[in-house]
Image (tube, helix red, strand yellow):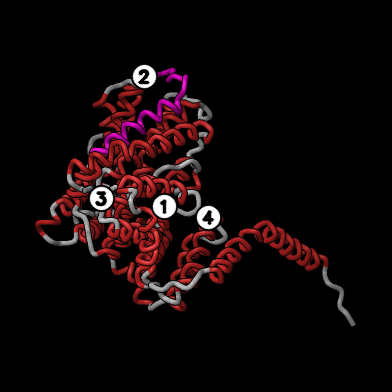
Amino acid sequence: TCEKVPLSEQTHDFSLLRQILLEVVMMQGTWWKWALSLGLPAIVFFATPEMEIASPNTPLFFAITLWAVIAWAVEVLPSAVIAAILTFLYALFVTKPAVVFSSWTTFLPWMCFSALIIAQVLNRTGLGKRIALRSMLLMGSSFTKTMIGLMCAGVIMTLLVPSGLARTVIFVAIAQGLIEALNVDTRSRMSSALIMGGYFAAIAPGLFCLTGTEMNLLALQVISGATGISVEYTDFIIQMAPFSVFYMAFSIMMIFIIRGKERLQNEGNLRTVLEERLKEMGPVTAEEIKIFLILLVGFIAFVTEQWHHLPGAFVFALVGMACFMPGMNLADEQDLRKVNLSFLIFLAACMSIGAVAQDLNIPKWISAHMSSLFEGHGAVTAISFSYVLGVAVNFLMTPMAAVGALGGPLAQLAVSLGLDPYTLVYALLYGLDQLLFPYEIGYLLYTFMSGAVTLRHIMGAFAIRMVAFALLIPLLLVPYWKLIGFLK
């Protein structure tokens, strides 16, 4: 005999069935992502030829890495989960776990951990906002001078805060405040110009100094691991800062391209708005002074590394922990819980790509085959190629993953061509900074979350910069490198 099911339970059963059907429909909408992320790596695994220099596990390495890259691009899983799977597959089937997890024994994850904590403190104390507002007021009250002042503040923050995302949060918030105070239509070109002014202030100075972005530090780690050659903080500034200033000036020009024919209706009130925003913050607090001193010590640690011989990055990471110490009381357990650990896992996985490739001898194999392509063409061709490679790869993988995967091979290629290993990677970094779509990097994606920037307003300016620097790098940067003896 069968008992009659109560109506309430029948309704529950129908709800469960409906939920299952919805999940099936959602899976059908993503099946092509899984097919793509699994199908292409399988083809690569079986199609990879035997490599006389590289390890027999190279085809499997390529397949696993390609799966992760595609999975990150189409977002089949959270980025940290993909990163963890990539790492575990390497450790189980490709090489020794000590190699795979070696990224955690380097400075970069721990320095970024400290930088993320400092970013929390900066946002809460308002020091970054105060520096930006004060810089804009010092430059003047017109739209042009305000944008220049914002960029100057970006340079100061770049020297102090080695986190592009932290700076983006600070400067985009300032731009949003200006849009609101000046009653700018969030769908207008002017709104897009103001928001991108904040974005460029945060990111354009990134190649001014070694600690400008996480990618710079990752490139240092990858190249030093591949070639044994490192670069000092002051050397990086000499090699990159002058051209970076030009890059920042060009980025300011892009703001005016984005603005188009629109003009700020309340430009006369701009100085008043900035003064009101600064006045709202009140006098400088003890917390702001404390975090500034912490950042100053971290900056000095980097600059003076060649004299005290302590790893500046680890000193910075240790100094960041001072935020929790008695007497400082700048951070607590709540701040610790807000740290984006997913980013750290993703960062370590990107570093593992380079470490495992190095262990399998893949960079030497790639450089051996690529060097023949550049024989007789000179350094300019190789540098231009690296820039174009960065632009192209940006559409397929995140810049961090690109540095982890391509940094070693490009460094080896540079050495085989008789160049400094950093020349080609520096050009790659400029290429990776050229964007068209928000999905290409998290900084720009966060900027679009403001809801005050329109894609069609900015694409033309980004495209102009992309093409312009394909010409300006060989015409300006290469001669400068020759002048200082960095490029023979």
Residue at x 50% of width, y 49% of height: 395
**Between disc 4 and disc 2, whose residue precedes?**
4
Q: Position of residue 468 (x, y in %)?
A: 39, 34
Q: Which mark is residue 210?
A: 3
**Between disc 3 and disc 1, whose residue precedes?**
3
468 lies left or right of 325? right
- What residue range appears in magenta? 242-269
Q: Position of residue 405 (x, y in %)?
A: 40, 60
* Residue 255 on the magenta span: yes
Q: How many other residues sit within 10 Å of disc 1, few (<14), some (14-19) or many (≥20)?
A: many
**Between disc 4 and disc 3, whose residue precedes?**
4
Q: How far apart are labels 4 and 2 at the CA level? A: 44 Å
User: Quadrant of residue 114 in the image?
Assistant: bottom left
Residue underneath mark 2 = 269
Q: Which mark is residue 399?
A: 1
Q: Nearer the viewer, residue 173 or 211?
A: 211
Q: Which mark is residue 155?
A: none
Q: Amino acid at mark 1?
A: Pro
224 lies left or right of 440? left
Does 60 appear above or below 333? below
Residue with the most extreme front position: 376
User: Quadrant of residue 402 in the image?
Assistant: bottom left
Q: Amino acid at mark 4?
A: Ala
Q: How many other residues sit within 10 Å of disc 3, few (<14), some (14-19) or many (≥20)?
A: many
Where is the N terminus found, in terms of image quarters? Answer: bottom right
Circle 1 — which element? helix
Residue underneath mark 4 = 73
Does 144 appear above or below 165? above
**Between disc 1 and disc 2, whose residue precedes?**
2
User: Quadrant of residue 479 in the image?
Assistant: top left
Q: How far apart are labels 3 and 1 at the CA level? A: 16 Å
